[in-house]
Image (tube, rainbow, N blue to C red):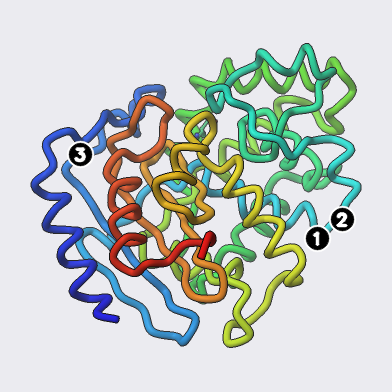
Amino acid sequence: MDFEGILQQIATDMQAETERGTAAGYIPELASVDTNQFGMAVALADGRSFAVGDSHRRFSIQSVSKVFTLALALGRLGEDLWRRVGREPSGLPFNSILQLEHEHGIPRNPFINAGALVVTDAILAGNAPREVLGEILRFVRAAAGDDDIHIDDAVARSETEHGDRNMALSHFLAAHGNFENSPELTCGTYFHQCAIEMTPHQLAMAGRFLVGSPDLPSMISRDRVRRINALMLTCGHYDGSGDFAYRVGLPGKSGVGGGILVIVPGRASIAVWSPGLNRHGNSKLGTLAVERFAQATGWSVFG
Ligand code: GLN
């Protein structure tokens, strides 16, 4: 397969797109990012990697961080984690509070904000945020095989300054007894995990732990790899998850920074970044690019 040619063609097509979506507007650091940027990287199970466009430019991974914290939480708590968070698509925006009241403070899944806050709260478990953030960074760096991955403090600070909604979700979870730490501590840790910066190349490399190939180093069990992939497919794009599964046919996790991590089980990890978002808060061109990639390669979890 001519991966280089496929990626070049996609990058050329994306450059010509005029409908690029809008950058996330909830914090100034993300609102000011240039939506003309586009980068994509593919890391294959056989060790080869390919990249195109702004594939070495750092971006804020935001909610893509939720796959790493979920892996850590499952490693620490095992199936007990599911007492505190569900495994169903929410059908609502990523930061919605609506379902929490009906469902007694148990968020629908670990990839919406409420669920991710519970996951972060679970790994925090009385430890100092600094230690837990160190653990998250160590996991991401080990997965990527690259120590040059850091947290953007300005983004984390800005998230804190504009964090009313996540704080409200946290207080609501605490009111239902589904929080072990103070909302301030868990939210602060969550804001910093979201502010991890990576390049598309680094993210594609880090995603290899979810490919489940015997040729790649395994950081978590095969069973867990399958399960995290199942959640990415059903819940990884919020209320746009069905559309992503229909168009791309592969598990993916998006973030409001415009990044998407996509897994081709047994074959590859793909990262794409373009900061313009669609109405669900998922990268507009990123989704289109991986849709084209899936068409060109014929790769799909549906055969
Ligand atoms: N930091 C963002 C928030 O909590 C992450 C959301 C996202 O990437 N969808 O609102």
Q: Is residue 275 above or below residue 264?
A: above
Q: Amino acid at mark 2?
A: Gly
Observer-nearest residue: 88 or 160? 88
CA gap between label 3 and label 2 equals 40 Å
Quarter-wise, where is residue 31 in the image? top left
Residue under label 1, please give it.
Answer: 75
Q: Residue at x 62, y 31 (%)?
A: 113
Q: Residue at x 51, y 37 (%)?
A: 242
Q: Residue at x 20, y 48 (%)?
A: 37
Mark 3 / mark 2, whichever is N-terminal? 3
Characterize the local packing of mark 3: few (<14), some (14-19) or many (20 or more) Cα atoms within 10 angstroms: few
Residue under label 2, please give it.
Answer: 78
Q: Are marks 1 and 3 in contact (CB under 8 Å)?
A: no
- Residue that sits furthest to the left in the current view: 16
Characterize the local packing of mark 1: few (<14), some (14-19) or many (20 or more) Cα atoms within 10 angstroms: some
Q: Position of residue 228 (x, y in %)?
A: 67, 55
Observer-nearest residue: 57 or 42? 42
- Residue that sits furthest to the front in the current view: 303
Residue under label 3, please give it.
Answer: 34
